[in-house]
Each structure stands twice: as structure tokens, then as C-alpha cells.
């Protein structure tokens, strides 16, 4: 299974002929998708921590925000959670105050030296001075990244040789026993890092805005998985930063559902303050645990925990 190169090739092909948006979906695909919707999972079995990659080749669709807030709410629900910043933009790291000046291993270090992290323990995600009284703060851990992750990703095929695309999976496999859930924040685009995250994942979650281009984007992720990894589970499309009462939200939901995509039943509403959370080095669910955004992420976290059986 060599996902990263095919992803490049097929996504370019996809942008010209997107079968899903054109409505050309064959019956075999439909039956596969139906089987993904039934909410149980055989592939992950009892392998410990369940890995969910938040993937969408579009940027600005709340991949990072949803990773941070869902991770926190899963920890609040009593789960041991690892969030992993697989994006060299390092927005997830920064959202928790993991700037480059903070000492400690980054994802790029762990991928570059796979033998080293045998005693590695991912640090608590919230910085020590942020919400020190929070009951579940120890349960949420992070593997941060910096922009150097981009260089490592470019060099990895040469450094690691054949099988390099499985390095993230191998790293997470070593940590599975310590976590119930692992959430991977991915960069925009379907390059090497997104490909490695997809290969490491037990399931994908597709954050999307309620907008025409996002319907296409979500469809492309479904199509890609159908072609390359038909056994990989897609938990569904997470509609965020959109109001349920907006017509475009209803339209988008209806069109995705008609296209055999599963739209998760809880939408995360839009709230301007979500965008200013990173300056406080904590996600919205920590800063404003009773806001409607927090309630939405809490319900989503509960739903996903139940669906993946962790
Ligand atoms: N529920 C929300 N309401 C308002 N703004 C949001 C919400 N969720 C995310 N945002 C903002 O939208 C922008 C894109 O979100 P982000 O999580 O960075 O997306 P991605 O990781 O997919 O690029 C960010 O500025 C973020 O703060
Ligand atoms: Mg992001």
C-alpha cells in the first residue's frame, strides 16, 4: 500500500472528473458506503488507541479547531487522548502554546529517528500555566510540530527509503497502549503528510463548511478512499462554523446525503470567539465550556466515542 504517490496522481485526475459531484456513483461504491454508515468497526479491533485523521484537502474548514476541541472534549469524557499536529503550519501546536521556543520533541524529530522514541511520552497539551485546575488536563496529550516538519516530509523518502509512508503509523502503534483515542490534524492538500496520516488512521473525519466547494471537497475524500483504501472507515462529514438555520447549511447537508456521504448529526455553529482562542493557548471548550460551540463539540465527542467503541 503506497498511498502518498497515488494520492498526488489521483487527486489531479479527480479535479478534472469528480465522479461524485457529477452523480456517477456505481452500485458497488454505494454498498460500501452503506456499510460504513452502520457505526461499527472491525478493522481497529482491540489494538488500543483508535486513530482518527481529520482530513480535507481544503484549508480553512476547521480541521485544526475541530482536532483541538474534539480532543479536549474526549478527554473531558474520561478518555486518554493524543492529538498530533501533522501540519507544518503548526496551528494546532500554536493553539496550545507550543511555539518553537518550548523545548521537547516534535513530530518531525520522532519521524526522523524512529528508534529514539521508545521511552518517549507525549506531553500534556495545555501549557502548565493554562487552566491548572482543570480535572482532565493530564488526559489530553500532544505531539506538536514546527515548520521543520515540511522539510522532513520532503526528505523522508530519501532518509527512510521504502516504506517511509508508514512511519507515522509505526510511531502511533508504539503509543496505542497509552491512549484511547488519537486525533491527527492534517495539512491542506493531499501530500505526503496527509497520506501518512490517512495510512495511520483507523477512520477519517472530514471537517467541511456548508459551502458548494466544500461539498466537492468532501466528495473527493470519499472517492479517494474508495479507490485507494476501500476498507478505511469514514466516520462522516463534520459541518462546522455553519448555522443550521442557514439555507446553505441545509442545502449542503441534503446534497451530501444524496451523494451517499454521511453528515454527522451535530453541527458546530459559527462563533467569532473561536478564532481568538489561540491567543489564550487553549481551545474554546476550555475557555468557554458552556458556550454553544462547546456543547456541540461535547455532543460530537460523545457520539464519536460511542461509534468507535472507545
Ligand atoms: N465554529 C467556528 N466559528 C467561527 N470561526 C471558526 C470556527 N471554527 C473555526 N473557525 C476559524 O476558522 C478558521 C479556519 O479554521 P481552522 O481550524 O484553522 O481550519 P483548517 O485547519 O481546516 O485550515 C480559523 O481562523 C478558525 O479560528
Ligand atoms: Mg489547520
Image (spheres, helix red, strand yellow):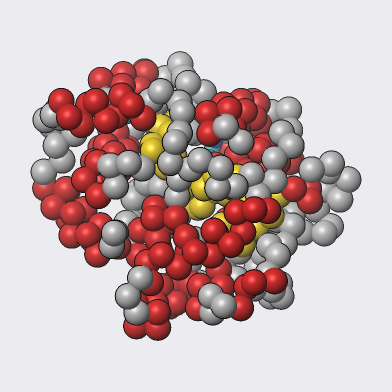
Q: Can residue 227 be seen in this view?
A: yes
Q: In this view, does 106 lie above or below 307?
A: below
Which residue occupies 74% across, 57% down?
124
Q: Where is residue 104 in the image (x, y as percent from the top left)?
A: 69, 73
Which residue occupies 33% across, 26% down?
35
Q: Is residue 177 above or below residue 270?
A: below
Q: Is residue 208 visible?
A: no
Q: Which residue lies furthest to the bottom in this view?
A: 159
Left or right, 237 with respect to 213, comes to right
Q: Where is residue 138 in the image (x, y as percent from the top left)?
A: 79, 51
- Quarter of the picture containing the N terminus is bottom left
Q: Position of residue 9 (x, y in %)?
A: 18, 60
In the rendered image, which quarter is residue 251 located in?
top left
In the rendered image, which quarter is residue 291 located in?
top right
In depth, the one of 45 and 308 nearer the eye is 45
Which residue occupies 25% across, 57% down?
7
Total numbered labels: 0
Q: In this view, does 195 lie above or below 232?
A: below
Q: In this view, does 227 lie above or below 116?
A: above
Which residue occupies 65% across, 58% down?
142
- Quarter of the picture containing the C terminus is top right
In the rendered image, which quarter is residue 42 located in?
top left
Q: Where is residue 259 in the image (x, y as percent from the top left)?
A: 24, 25
In depth, the one of 231 and 138 nearer the eye is 231
Amino acid at each position: 500500500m503506497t498511498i502518498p504517490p497515488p494520492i498526488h496522481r489521483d487527486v489531479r485526475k479527480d479535479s478534472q472528473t469528480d465522479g461524485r459531484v457529477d452523480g456517477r456513483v456505481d452500485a458497488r461504491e454505494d454498498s460500501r458506503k452503506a456499510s460504513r454508515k452502520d457505526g461499527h468497526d472491525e478493522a481497529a479491533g482491540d489494538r488500543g488507541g483508535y486513530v482518527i485523521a481529520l482530513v480535507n484537502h481544503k484549508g480553512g474548514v476547521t480541521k485544526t479547531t475541530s482536532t483541538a476541541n474534539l480532543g479536549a472534549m474526549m478527554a473531558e469524557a474520561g478518555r486518554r487522548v493524543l492529538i498530533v499536529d501533522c501540519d507544518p503550519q503548526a496551528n494546532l501546536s500554536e493553539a496550545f502554546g507550543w511555539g518553537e521556543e518550548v523545548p521537547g520533541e516534535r513530530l518531525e524529530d520522532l519521524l526522523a529517528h524512529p528508534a529514539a522514541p521508545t521511552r518517549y511520552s507525549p506531553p500534556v497539551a495545555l501549557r502548565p500555566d493554562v487552566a491548572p485546575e482543570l480535572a482532565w488536563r493530564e488526559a489530553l496529550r500532544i505531539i506538536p510540530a514546527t515548520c521543520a516538519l515540511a522539510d522532513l516530509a520532503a526528505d523522508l523518502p530519501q532518509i527512510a527509503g521504502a516504506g517511509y509512508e508508514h512511519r507515522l503509523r509505526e510511531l502511533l502503534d508504539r503509543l496505542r497502549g497509552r491512549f484511547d483515542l488519537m486525533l491527527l490534524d492534517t495539512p491542506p492538500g493531499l501530500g505526503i503528510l496527509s497520506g501518512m496520516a490517512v495510512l495511520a488512521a483507523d477512520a477519517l473525519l472530514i471537517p467541511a463548511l456548508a459551502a458548494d466547494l466544500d461539498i466537492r471537497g468532501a466528495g473527493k475524500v470519499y472517492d479517494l478512499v474508495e479507490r485507494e483504501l476501500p476498507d478505511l472507515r469514514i466516520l462522516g462529514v463534520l459541518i462546522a462554523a455553519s448555522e443550521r438555520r442557514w439555507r446553505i447549511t441545509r442545502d449542503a447537508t441534503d446534497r451530501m446525503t444524496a451523494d451517499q456521504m454521511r453528515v454527522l448529526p451535530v453541527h458546530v455553529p459559527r462563533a467569532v470567539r473561536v478564532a481568538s482562542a489561540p491567543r489564550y493557548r487553549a481551545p474554546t471548550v476550555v475557555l468557554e465550556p458552556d458556550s454553544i460551540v462547546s456543547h456541540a463539540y461535547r455532543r460530537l465527542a460523545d457520539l464519536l466515542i460511542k461509534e468507535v467503541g472507545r
